[in-house]
Amino acid sequence: LKLKPSGSGHCGSRECGCFFAGWILQRHSAARAEQMAFAPKRNAPATRPKQPDGRRAEQMSVWSEMAAKLPVQKTPEDRQKRVKLFRQFDPNDNKYLSLAEVDRGIVQILRIKALADAKPAIMRAFQAAKSLNTKKGCPSVGDDYIDWCEFRLLLCYLRDYFELHVMFKRIDGGDGRIDETEFARSADMLREWGAKIKDPATTFKAIDQNGGGQILFDEFCEWAIQQKLALEEADDN
């Protein structure tokens, strides 16, 4: 997840200007979340984990598809595409989107299957974007829905949280949680993505905030955001 200095932005093609701020919303104000969205990022590590050719090709296809279908750039062309997409997502024409409408739009309109299957990423993206409307002259519908002024950020977050979900699934054994053995086994891969891990057991306990002995997706996201992890294939698109 490659960040640029404030004003230039990132996301997908890296021009959309957003980063992970959803986890901050429960701890800080929306203004602080926006500030974090433009925090500078360290350079990506020179060495990256090698993926089997088949899986890498599949992931490259997913990133390319998302870059083509998510109009996140601040250009007249992409804005026009967003206007059309927002209307398609909003079948009731009430000018705001519920989580169900966003999910339906991803499945039926965007038709990005990998993203549609990543429900935790969709939920996190929705939660991150739904209360960030602070623009003057842009009416807010409250913190339970996505309005037009939050829509571009939603598209940015969908791509970013999907990247975290891909990471999480590569570590997770298949039950939607990461245990200490799985984390320790994946420590080298996490380091290649940019994580600073000296002792896997100590890091695991720090991420496992509720002490349940397992890392949930939300906990992983918060830690990964702080570590500024990045997938090579995602950064290449």
Image (spheres, rainbow, N blue to C red):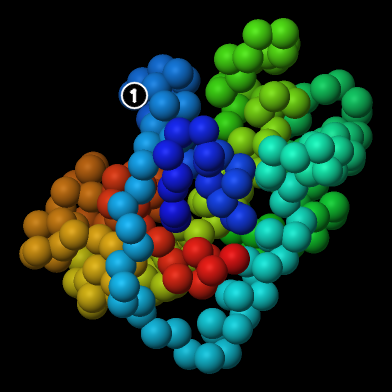
Q: Report the front residue among 8 and 202.
A: 8
With 18 as the anchor, is 148 left or right in this view? right
Specify the quadrant of the image occupied by residue 16. top right
Q: Residue at x 58, y 32 (%)?
A: 129
Q: Residue at x 56, y 51 (%)?
A: 14
Label tally? 1
Q: Is residue 223 above or below residue 145?
A: below
Specify the quadrant of the image occupied by residue 144. top right
Q: Residue at x 53, y 41 (%)?
A: 9
Residue 191 placement (x, y as % from top left): 25, 68
Q: Report the front residue among 143 and 13.
A: 13
Residue 128 placement (x, y as % from top left): 52, 34
Specify the quadrant of the image occupied by residue 95. top right
Residue 29 placement (x, y as % from top left): 41, 17
Q: Secondary structure at mark 1?
A: loop
Quarter of the image that includes the N terminus: bottom left
Whether residue 97 is visible to the viewer of this picture, yes or no, is yes
Q: Which residue is mark 1?
A: 27
Q: Residues within 10 Å of mark 1 (few under 14, many from 20)?
A: few
Q: Farthest bottom residue?
A: 53
Residue 82 placement (x, y as % from top left): 80, 39
Whether residue 85 is visible to the viewer of this picture, yes or no, is no
Quarter of the image that includes the C terminus: bottom right
Q: Is residue 26 above or below residue 183?
A: above
With 87 as the anchor, is 170 left or right in this view? left
Q: Residue at x 44, y 47 (%)?
A: 3
Q: Report the front residue among 45 and 128.
A: 45
With 76 as the anchor, is 120 left or right in this view? left
| Amino acid found under the numbered disc labelled 1 | Arg
